[in-house]
Amino acid sequence: MAATEAVPKKPQLFEQTSQYRHWRFKPEALEQLRTANNKRGVERVVLGLREEAQVDDKSALETRIAEATTNLLTPREELQLVGYYLQMIVQTIKVYSRIHLLKPEALNNVKATAINFMKRFYLHNVVFDYPPKSIMLTCFYLATKVENSFMKIDDFIRPLQDAESKRGSKIQTKSDDILGLEFVVIQSLQFELAVHYPYRPAYGFFLDMQAYIDDVQLLKTVHERAHHFIDISLFTDLVFLYQPPQIALGAFKLAAREKDLDIDPYLARRFDAHELEVLYPILDDVQDVISGFKNISQKEAQLIDRKLILCRNPEKNPNSKLYKKKVADQADTPYVSDSDSD
């Protein structure tokens, strides 16, 4: 009799997504990627300054290069600055909620998607080329479209301009500041706009646990606290390391521990010994990362931002003479169609 062939294990639904296939990394791979991006960004800054010297004051070249080199951001400082603007996404979204431009039921999805877009963007780009404030707003605006909360660009920028006027800011956000970067962001996201986050799996665990845990009110409190921990997880690298249900369960376990609810008996019933052997280290890491997270203060961000002003890549800086020259040169270049070249 022929031996029975092993039936290949059917992949989980999440394992078939682009997020699983293209946006999952090991911690050391993330660090290497960010370090390599930073190094290439630094090289572009120096090259850009040398090129700008050809259209500006050559005598000041060495001074400017020295000034930029002294203030170059490290990969860690880049990560901190981006992290601060990830936090600002949350604050900005609250403004749109208060004036009813975003419906309450859309807030979580828009927030999580915008944060995820921005984190993905800076895996392939650096703040020397693209300072995070404009990228933050572009990711936010793009997230409103993806999450079916679209608003016209004029409606989107009006609250930003109102806030800038109240602060007495001389610079106002323009629609082109956002729309001009939209394709750059989408391209950096590899045109993969679907985002999966842990909120829905957490709700699924909440419903499932009710069959095993008698104190439903306590379980509800734990679920609400787990929701808070999931909010925190969005700002960390957990989204690149683990699957949404794993992050959700880690957040649940952290919340349960805080509220003196033991969910280990539930886990023992729902998973076999081998699965638990794999799962528990993941849940421990999720809890450690969430517990160890600290917000980046405005003061820290301002210090890094001041350094960034001095080491921007002039080729990507609309205020630089090099950028303006290249735009002018491009405008003066006559268009040649494919048929004209025959």
Image (cartoon, rainbow, N blue to C red):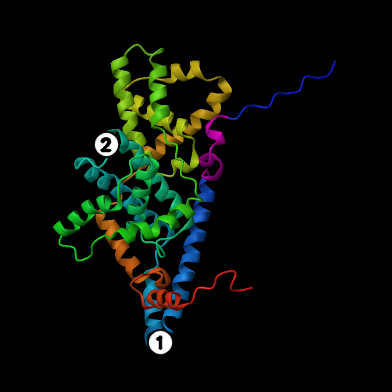
List x then y, in percent, for residue 20. Answer: 53, 39
Is 184 located above or below residue 232 in the figure? below
Residue type, numbered disc 2: Lys
Whole-Å distance between the Cαs marked 1 and 2?
Answer: 54 Å
Picture mark count: 2
Corner quadrant of residue 76: bottom left
Residue 124 placement, left or right of 223 = right
List x then y, in percent, for residue 2. Answer: 84, 18
Residue 253 seen from this side:
no
Q: Residue at x 52, y 43 (%)?
A: 24
Q: Is residue 20 magenta?
A: yes
Is 183 located above or below residue 2 in the figure? below
Location of mark 1 (residue): 58
Q: Is residue 105 magenta?
A: no
Residue type, numbered disc 1: Lys
The residues colored magenta run 12-25
Residue extending farthest right: 1
